[in-house]
Image (tube, rainbow, N blue to C red):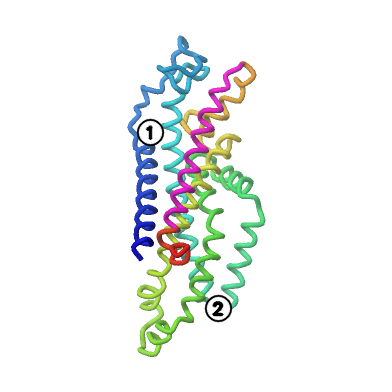
Amino acid sequence: MRALANRRARVLALAILLAAVLAGVYALGLLIPEEAIAGSYLQAGQAPSLSHPFGTDALGRDLLLRTLKGLSTSMTVGIAASLISAGIAVLVGIASAIGSRRVDAGINWGIDLVMGVPHTILVMLISFALGRGLKGLLVGIAATHWCSLARLIRAEVLQLRGQPYVAVSRKLGKSSAWILVHHLLPHLMPQFLVGLILLFPHAILHEASVSFLGFGLPPEQPAIGIILSESMRYLSAGQWWSAVLPGAALVLLVLLVDRLGEQVRRVLDPWSAQE
């Protein structure tokens, strides 16, 4: 038991450390003023150096500062889209599990329909229909990433409905709303939290890919997808740093969030805690 407690403490400490790193990157990006990423043609196209660790782009803007600013923008979109998508997943999963057969069949049909279309294409269509920009991108990501978590929530609710304590509560005359609040929702919080964290990297990658293709954020927005899209035209001129270094920062962010979600799952999941 002492070894298990020490292991859980180490896992929890690592999860807190990763969360602190992500929060630091997010806060640092928000604190960077717009004047700091202004262009200067005298410094255009400079390779990575001590003064500009990521180099500068074709307009003389510092790529490190733009990357940090872009990561904070991507994280803002990812957080908002993940929260909305996870909330939709919980509502749809509960409705499918406790509803009638027709409701369950209709929801499962809708999930199959959404999952049958590639997410990037569906996000692009929704974003284009809503006029692109932040609103269209946010709605598109939030509307396409809830399906897998909804199925997990549905399966968990179906399992919880058969537990003895739920049957006892019904015998005691408790309403369905009371059972939902006091029995179902507390057991669904670990799945919701882990699902929320694991949805986050998917939302960031889709934001970057859709913005890269020109269907997401506007060109003046300092987002990773915009930075990578602008760098493509200068790769043939030898400015490899304008694409490689911001892209590597995006990959590192996604890996950190994925690692954070894995550590949180190992802390909250009783099965993995015994591994």
Relative image position of residue 185 (x, y in whole percent): 40, 69
| Label 1 Cα neighbours within 10 Å, binned few <14 / some 14-19 / many ≥20 | many
Would you say residue 258 sits in the magenta stretch? yes
Q: Going 66% across and 56% down the picture, which residue do you hit?
A: 116
Q: Going 37% across and 52% down the picture, which residue do you hit?
A: 10
Q: Could you tell whether 185 is left or right of 97 in the image? A: left
Q: Mark 1 or 2, which is nearer the eye?
A: 1
Direction top: furthest residue: 42
**Quarter of the rendering containing residue 267:** bottom left
Above or below: residue 101 compared with residue 204 = below
| Label 2 Cα neighbours within 10 Å, binned few <14 / some 14-19 / many ≥20 | few
Tell me the residue that label 1 is attached to.
29
Q: Going 36% across and 84% down the picture, which residue do you hit?
A: 174
Q: Amino acid at mark 1?
A: Gly
Above or below: residue 213 compared with residue 3 = above
Q: Amino acid at mark 2?
A: Ser
Direction bottom: furthest residue: 171
As measured in the structure, the alpha-carbon distance from the residue carrying label 1 to the one carrying label 2 is 47 Å
Dominant SS in magenta: helix
Relative image position of residue 164 (x, y in whole percent): 43, 84
Query: In this view of the protein, which residue sits in the foreground, 142 or 56?
Result: 56
Q: Quadrant of the N terminus?
A: bottom left
Q: Could you tell whether 76 is left or right of 98 in the image? A: left
Relative image position of residue 55 (x, y in whole percent): 48, 19
Q: Please, what secondary structure does the residue beneath circle 2 have?
A: loop
In the image, which residues are magenta? 238-265
Tell me the residue that label 2 is attached to.
100
**Tag 2 or tag 1, which sits nearer the N-term?**
1
